[in-house]
Amino acid sequence: MDLNKEFVKAKRPCADGFRWFLRNYQEGSDYQPLLDALVSAGRVDDACWLLNQFGPTDAVLSVDAIDAEAIVFAGTLEVRGNIEVDSLLRAGRTIRAGGGIRAGQSVIAGEDIRADGGIRCDGALTAGGDIKAGWGIDVQGDLRCGGELRAEWALYCSGELSVGGNAMVGHDLVSEGAIRCGKNVRAGGSITVSGDLLAGNGVEAGERISCLGHLEANWGIKAGNSIIAEGAIKAGESLHASEEIRAGVGYGVYAGLIVQFDAWEASARVQARSKPERLMSGWWAGVCQ
């Protein structure tokens, strides 16, 4: 793609960025070389603006490893080893790493982000498609995933966590903000949320579920230990915990919200160490064995 001054000007760039373009590329430039030049000149925000305007390409960059200040690539990055970036890592399509991914700021991909190792970034982690890590995920910002999210080890997010599909974590899942998931949230360890947890399908944890806001699932909620929320606990079907089920002060516990009353005994069962206080709906099935 050849970007000449008329083509770029039609996108209404900022005055400073357009002056830089005229000084350095009066006769125009191909798309990716211009992105590379902007990044090399320390104009990473301008490179991101350009990618936003002209979109992704089908180009593929395949290398053994990446160790750079910043990367803005319009196509797909295929890296056989590790990706180490001091600031921003961004691709118009997919980022794949045979090792780990680390960025001093955000990691953004228009499609998938996949790493055989871990993923760590000091900003947001954003993918239009899936995010999958063979180890853990540590995000010092918001995590937004348009598809499936999977971490074989633990997942920590200091902001909000939003997932279009399933969120599957091998060990503990910790979010300092709300969790909104289009399908299921599952963790082999505990789920700890400093906000609301809202799941389009179900929620399941091998250990404890702890939520400082409301806990809601259109299907069931199951924990190997306790289910505790500071707000309401609402399940479309059943609630199951080996220890206690406890909602916040002044809030209730609801099961069977999408189940006909006559089917509560089979599909809206509530089991725990003791009957939850303020159990507003659902079939109390007795102490969990």
Image (tube, rainbow, N blue to C red):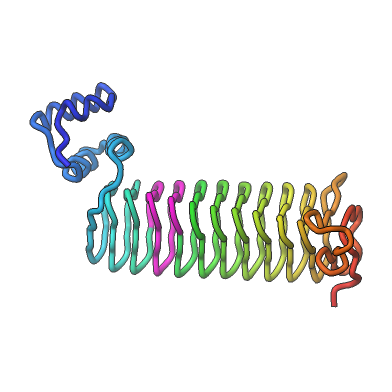
Where residue 6 sits, quadrant-wise, is top left
Q: Is residue 216 left or right of residue 72?
A: right
Which residue corresponds to the image point at 50% horizontal and 47% vertical from the top-left?
141
Above/below status of 258 relative to 177? below
240 is within the stretch colored magenta: no
**Which range of residues does the magenta coloring cover?**
102-130
Q: Nearer the viewer, residue 193 or 168?
A: 168
Question: Considering the image in quadrants, where does the N terminus appear?
Answer: top left
Above/below status of 82 relative to 43? below
Q: Is residue 17 left or right of residue 106?
A: left
- Counting every numbered tag in the picture gives 0
125 is within the stretch colored magenta: yes
Above/below status of 169 relative to 258? below
Which residue corresponds to the image point at 32% horizontal and 57% vertical from the top-left?
84
Above/below status of 14 relative to 225? above
Which residue corresponds to the image point at 34% horizontal and 58% vertical from the top-left?
95
Q: Position of residue 227 (x, y in %)?
A: 77, 61
Q: Position of residue 265 (x, y in %)?
A: 88, 67
Q: Position of residue 245 (x, y in %)?
A: 83, 61
Question: Considering the image in quadrants, where does the C terminus appear?
Answer: bottom right
Which residue corresponds to the image point at 72% horizontal and 47% vertical from the top-left?
213
